[in-house]
Image (spheres, helix red, strand yellow):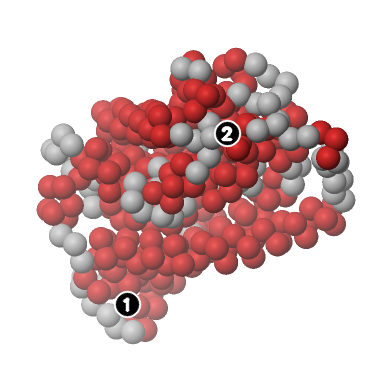
Amino acid sequence: MKIVFEWMNNQLLKMQWLQDIVNWFFGSVLKINVDSLLYKGITFFFYDVIKIFILLSVLIFIASYVQSYFSPERTKKILGRFKGIWANIIGALLGTITPFCSCSSIPIFIGFTRAGLPVGVTFSFLISSPLVDLASVILLASIFNWQIAIAYVVVGLVIAVIGGSLIGFFKMDKYVEEFVTAKIDSASVTEIEEVKMTRKDRLKYSFDQVKEIIKRVWIYILIGVGIGAIIHGFIPQSFIETVLGSKNPFSVIIATIIGIPMYADIFGTLPIAEALVLKGVGIGTVLSFMMAVTALSLPSIIMIKKVVKTKLLLTFVGIVTIGIIVMGYLFNIFGYLFV
């Protein structure tokens, strides 16, 4: 059974067959020296681009079919049934299976807040939504392994739950902008009924999501794979180890700071993460970089600033940053458990 699972994992997720084809094409057909930096960089680029687009298309379709059962209206109803820490846990879990990213943070935040949901619960949802999703688990497993993929998801959920719980504990609802909390005249608003979707509707929705998301992220994937190829093929390992290696006690902090200005989702950061791991960077440092890019990108922070006051924004950024850094160091210390 173990042998069968490993074979399926290597062929279906890691796509070893694709790696062999790419290596054969550039090594045997184009006669590029297999020991050259060009060969290492170009095979990394083409293999990762093709693999990510194949996996991403399949996974987006599957995830979108699941997500079609969780409209914003239904999500609000589910969250409204829970109180306290359980509300934060459910909010974080729903963030992993609902089709919302940091780009949609403003309307989701406004909708949830006006529906009467506590700000802490809303932030648990907002933290986990861009940080963890169904597709990211499979893609992480395809590049690293299942232990790291599952650990990443668990840590992401823990950060989301703790972050939202602390914001709720500090009673920071008052730091939401007034226009968000303004009451809407119920007499002038018609309650929107949740639209029932047929199987055909769900299939169409899933195909549309594949086209829409691929159209939105393809450029970030190419950029990410391109950066990964440069790191893998052309940047000396000694330089990477000096800046982000285990001997540098500030490697996790540096990786987190580098990730914040970038704008990409997890699909664009994965090839960079893969290249860094191949260069000997600790798994905790790599995951810190990925989480910083997805949860704390400047565009996301700017959008959230439009609906919350500075004190709440700084609290959110501070909690998530500290959580990511602590997680990074713990992963580096106990990384041997995930090999």
Element class at badge 2: helix
Q: From the viewer's perspective, is residue 255 above or below residue 232? A: above
Q: Residue 178: which numbered mark, if any?
A: 2
Q: Nearer the viewer, residue 185 or 29?
A: 185
Residue that mark 1 sits on = 27
Q: Nearer the viewer, residue 303 or 226?
A: 303
Where is residue 30 drawn, in percent x and y? 33, 84
Q: Crowding near pointer 2: few (<14 within 10 Å), some, many (20+)?
A: few
Residue 282 can be seen in this image: no
Q: Left of 330 or right of it: where is 87?
A: right
Look at discs 1 and 2 and give the one toward the viewer: 2
**Would you identify the image quadrant in which residue 206 lies?**
bottom right
Q: Crowding near pointer 1: few (<14 within 10 Å), some, many (20+)?
A: some
**Would you identify the image quadrant in which residue 284 lies?**
top left
Element class at badge 1: helix
Tell me the kind of residue under disc 2. Glu
Q: Earlier in the sequence, mark 1 or mark 2?
A: 1
Where is residue 116 drawn, in percent x and y? 68, 26
Q: Left of 248 or right of it: where is 333?
A: right
Write the residue at 61% across / 36% down.
180
Write the residue at 65% across / 26% down.
117
Q: Residue 315: which numbered mark, if any?
A: none
**Would you identify the image quadrant in which residue 196 lies?**
top right
